[in-house]
Amino acid sequence: MAQLGLGMASLGRPGYINLGHGQDLKHDYSIESVRRNAFKVLNKAWQSGIRHFDVARSYGRAEEFVSQWISDKSITPHDITVSSKWGYTYTAAWKVQTPEGVAHEVKRHELPVLQRQYATSLRHLGDHLKIYQIHSATSESGVLKNQAVLEFLGRIRQTGMLIGLSVSGPTQSETIEEALTLEVNGERLFQSIQATWNLLERSAEPALQKAHDHGLKVIIKESVANGRLTSRNQCPNFHSKKQQLRQLARNHQSTIDAISIAAAMNRPWADVVLSGATTTAQVESNIMANTLQWDEKLECQTSKFVEAPTDYWHSRAQLTWN
Ligand SMILES: NC(=O)c1ccc[n+]([C@@H]2O[C@H](COP(=O)([O-])OP(=O)(O)OC[C@H]3O[C@@H](n4cnc5c(N)ncnc54)[C@H](OP(=O)(O)O)[C@@H]3O)[C@@H](O)[C@H]2O)c1
């Protein structure tokens, strides 16, 4: 069974796209309050046995928070895995809503961005940083054909860092397939892949199985569909699925989010499943996945929730920053 990790996308900044981010932060957006909340969630995750933490240069102050927390707790590199990502720059200036025309994060998959962001990530995280990922690589962005970027990643790899990429959207599988073909100095470049898989969107499964078969570490993100696979989802279109999930959760003395996370943890090709918990209560609920006995019956009962990938990613695109 895959291990649980903690993703910091919602913990390092005041605004995020999940359903109730503002509520989680009690609408208190000062840097100190957001940091305090992040430390509480990090502590809860650590006490619950979580040892993998995922950040990115664009998650506001996430790298800085994790670095301070590691230092406060004197955690040695041996005891923790931190993964980070380069390619997006945080541009929201600690605002929940940005002014019209100003993005929350700007994507540029170019060598100078990689060089600048890698230096910053290393400065924050040092030897605790074990995996460095291209943030949301796509075939269209051209990053997988950018020889200068690939060679620089090859050099980072020689230092012992695992080189990875994260993927998103309906073309995740194609990007994974393309990434698997890439070599630098006669060696496969990528050693890790982070992708979306959840009960609503399972289309990357064959590509992720292949990545696993090639020896890549597979990290699942968005295992509760950004909050849609939780009791918080009030969307009328989801009502019937929610009723069924709630019944399953009751039958197993569990929660909807834990059932969804357990489904991801029980993919035979998965190594890590990221919890995106924003509060300690959400960590407590999410980690119930660890003790859920997954069996054929649950596999069958949960297989019917899947959506067409285009519908899934269309709904995902409707989520607003809050
Ligand atoms: N392209 C990429 O590389 C990429 C993209 C996305 C994510 N990621 C990584 O994956 C991690 C997880 O992704 P994610 O947070 O976007 O998606 P997720 O894990 O599917 O969703 C997490 C959200 O679900 C809600 N939630 C969780 N447990 C809950 C509960 N018990 N009750 C009510 N709501 C609950 C919370 O949202 P509310 O705000 O509504 O409370 C929480 O922030 C990120 O932190 C990041 O590390 C990477």
Image (tube, rainbow, N blue to C red):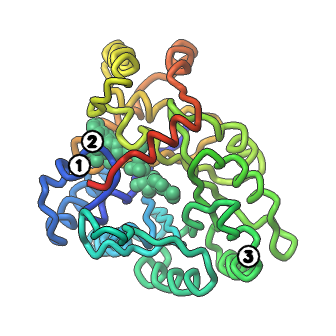
Q: Which residue is mark 3?
A: 146
Label 1 near ligand 1 (CB < 8 Å)? yes
Mark 2 and mark 1 residues within 8 Å of each other at the beta carbon: yes
Residue occupying image coordinates x 38% and y 72%: 63
- Residue 140 location, x and y as percent? 68, 62
Residue occupying image coordinates x 20% and y 64%: 34
Q: Secondary structure at mark 3?
A: loop
Q: Is residue 321 left or right of residue 40?
A: right
Q: Secondary structure at mark 1?
A: loop
Q: Nearer the viewer, mark 2 or mark 3?
A: 3
Q: Which residue is mark 2?
A: 282
Q: CA distance from mark 2 to mark 1?
A: 5 Å
Residue reaching furthest right? 186
| Quarter of the image with the C terminus in it | bottom left
Q: CA distance from mark 2 to mark 3?
A: 40 Å
Query: Mark 2 vs mark 3: which is more N-terminal?
Result: 3
- Residue 102 location, x and y as percent? 36, 72
Q: Is residue 115 left or right of residue 255?
A: right
Residue 149 in sight: yes
* Image: 155 above or below 248: below
The amino acid type, in three-letter code, at marker 2 is: Gln
Q: Secondary structure at mark 2?
A: helix
Q: Nearer the viewer, mark 3 or mark 1?
A: 3
User: Residue 279, labelled with which disc?
Assistant: 1
* Image: 299 above or below 309: above
Density class for disc 1 (Cα within 10 Å; few <14, some 14-19, many ≥20) is many
- Residue 175 location, x and y as percent? 70, 54
Q: Nearer the viewer, residue 135 or 251?
A: 135
**The quadrant where residue 247 appears:** top left
**The quadrant where residue 114 appears:** bottom right
